Image: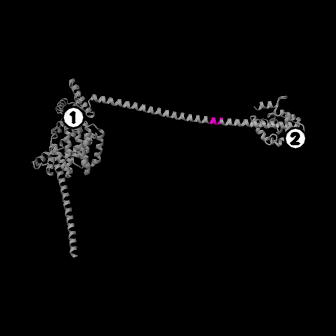
């Protein structure tokens, strides 16, 4: 048992020792990698301070430049960087540089990979291969984002903003300048390396902050030696800043200094162009003519920039002042050629083609506007027609419903009329019976009583309202049969009493005087007396037929 415990204890100690060894090796590896990165950055700073001296001390033997090893790839990168600073037009083997970039990526040498990509982008720029140049910078951006290196993000976004300026794309320039400002603020830039400060000075020139640019560039110039890799760039930027701010004397001073150290034809052309403009504005014609000739001598670029256009405009003015018409025409022709090249770069077409394309775009826009108007008009017409259709359908429905209602009313009126006719026939039949009964009452008493008894046995008088002296039902039958005679009578002649109203309604039903006397069971004299009272109350003329008079008055 003790042996097992000792064995387990020994295993535990061995595991702890193994873990400690791994941790030590990891720390050593990380510290070695950090030391290598720091040593590489120190070499870059030395290279920028004096590229000639650094290149002379660099081991350029075949073994040292074996790009399949980290040491060889690093030496090849540093050599290429030094040569690029000494001569911007230097050509190096891009295939080898791409191999170095791949090796640095595999070994996770981030800063070396970024420097390699930056160098490749400049090489593609010299070849006017914009597509490859942008692709390389975007790849470098991905790497810088992964490394969370704000300084390199600032470099790369500034590089993309320079590309945007070359392509005359102001929106992209603003976009990349904003991203650069987010990566490093102005205060952070001032505490970084010289290259970042120069980028900030260039951006101040682009944004017309000339005094700020001049102050920053003068500070940089005082802090670097003439052998520094960015010394010529700083002098050129100072000349441009004074030129933009129209300080001609200072511009001439710094531009002449830049001419002493610049090496490429592009920069010499820019410097002589600036000097031509400065001397022309100062009135020094001889110096302006000399600088003009020198600028034309170095105008060998395949790509047109804004400086060339401004230069040939000045040359045209200069020739005009000297009454050199041929020279003026030649300069203006070159200005037109530069504009055509710019338009061709923007559109891929000539100036005439661009004008035609612009006219085509205008026609297309006009056509689209007209088409939109027609579409809106058609839509409006459709909406109006749809609305009119809905209104028409609703109106037809209303008319159909109204017609149906009228038909129903007609049907009801016809039914009512039919019922009314049947009712009138029944009422008239009852009245006729009543008349016969009244007549019988005037005959001999024996015969009348015998007949009345037979009528009662047959139930002929059970439903007769008049015979049974139910006057309200009788009045209702009078209204039905004679167009509301009863109600019209009592409304117009409210002074008539019940006997007088009964007499009028009996006359309207066709009863004679003797029949009325029989219905009342009174004498004919009483009926005549009642008629006299009615005549007085209704103001009927003497001798006129009371029934005819009332029908005319109540009609």
Q: Is residue 521 left or right of residue 315?
A: right
- Cα gap from disc 2 to disc 1, whole angstroms: 146 Å
Q: Is residue 368 left or right of residue 547?
A: left
Residue 408 within the segment the image draws in magenta = yes
Can residue 195 be spotted in the picture?
yes
Which residue is labeled 2 in the image? 450
Which disc is residue 303 wearing? 1
Q: Is residue 188 left or right of residue 554?
A: left
| Quarter of the image that includes the C terminus | top right
Q: Is residue 62 left or right of residue 393?
A: left
Residue at 19% over, 62% down: 24
Specify start and end residues of the magenta stretch as a single range.
Answer: 405-410
Classify mark 1: residues with Cα within 10 Å, few (<14), some (14-19) or many (20+). Answer: few
How many badges with numbers are in the image?
2
Dot 1: what SS?
loop
33 up-or-down from 239: above or below: below
Q: Earlier in the sequence, mark 2 or mark 1?
A: 1
């Amino acid at each position: 048992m003790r042996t097992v415990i000792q064995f387990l204890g020994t295993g535990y100690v061995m595991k702890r020792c193994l873990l400690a060894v791994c941790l030590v090796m990891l720390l050593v590896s990380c510290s070695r990698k950090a030391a290598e990165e720091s040593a590489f950055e120190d070499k870059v700073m030395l290279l920028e301070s004096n590229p000639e001296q650094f290149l002379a001390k660099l081991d350029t033997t075949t073994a040292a430049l074996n790009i399949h090893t980290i040491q060889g790839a690093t030496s090849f990168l540093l050599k290429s960087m030094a040569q690029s600073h000494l001569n911007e037009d230097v050509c190096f083997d891009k295939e080898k540089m791409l191999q170095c970039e791949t090796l640095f990526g595999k070994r996770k040498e981030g800063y070396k990979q970024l420097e390699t990509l930056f160098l490749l982008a400049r090489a593609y720029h010299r070849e006017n291969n914009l597509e490859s140049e942008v692709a390389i910078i975007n790849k470098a951006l991905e790497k810088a984002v992964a490394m969370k290196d704000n300084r390199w993000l600032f470099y790369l976004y500034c590089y993309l903003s320079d590309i945007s300026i070359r392509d005359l794309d102001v929106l992209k320039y603003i976009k990349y300048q904003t991203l650069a400002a987010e990566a490093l603020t102005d205060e952070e830039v001032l505490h970084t390396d010289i290259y970042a400060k120069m980028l900030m000075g260039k951006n101040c020139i682009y944004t017309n902050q000339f005094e700020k640019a001049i102050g920053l560039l003068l500070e940089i110039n005082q802090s670097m030696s003439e052998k520094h890799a960015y010394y010529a760039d700083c002098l050129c930027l100072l000349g441009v800043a004074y030129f933009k701010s129209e300080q001609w004397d200072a511009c001439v001073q710094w531009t002449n200094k830049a001419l002493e150290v610049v090496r490429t034809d592009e920069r010499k052309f820019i410097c002589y162009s600036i000097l031509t403009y400065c001397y022309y504005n100062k009135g020094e014609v001889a110096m302006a003519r000399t600088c003009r000739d020198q600028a034309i001598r170095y105008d060998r670029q395949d790509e047109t920039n804004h400086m060339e256009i401004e230069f040939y405009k000045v040359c045209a003015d200069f020739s005009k002042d000297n009454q050199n018409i041929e020279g003026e025409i030649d300069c203006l022709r070159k200005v037109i050629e530069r504009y055509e090249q710019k338009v061709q770069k923007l559109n891929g077409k000539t100036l005439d083609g661009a004008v035609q394309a612009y006219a085509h775009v205008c026609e297309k826009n006009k056509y689209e506007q007209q088409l939109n108007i027609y579409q809106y008009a058609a839509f409006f017409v459709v909406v109006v027609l749809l609305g009119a259709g809905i209104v028409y359908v609703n109106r037809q429905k209303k008319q159909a419903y109204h017609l149906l209602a009228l038909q129903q009313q007609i049907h009801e009126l016809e039914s009512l009329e039919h019922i009314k006719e049947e009712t009138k026939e029944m009422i008239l039949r009852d009245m006729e019976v009543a008349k016969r009964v009244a007549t019988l009452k005037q005959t001999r008493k024996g015969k009348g009583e015998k007949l009345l008894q037979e009528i009662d046995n047959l139930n002929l008088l059970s439903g007769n309202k008049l015979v049974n002296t139910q006057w309200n039902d009788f009045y209702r039958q009078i209204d039905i049969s004679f167009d509301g005679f009863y109600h019209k009578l009592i409304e117009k002649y409210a002074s008539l009493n019940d006997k007088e109203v009964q007499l009028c309604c009996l006359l309207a039903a066709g009863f004679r005087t003797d029949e009325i006397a029989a219905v009342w069971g009174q004498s004919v004299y009483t009926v005549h007396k009642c008629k006299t009272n009615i005549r007085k109350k209704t103001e009927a003329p003497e001798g006129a037929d009371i029934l005819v008079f009332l029908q005319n008055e109540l009609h």
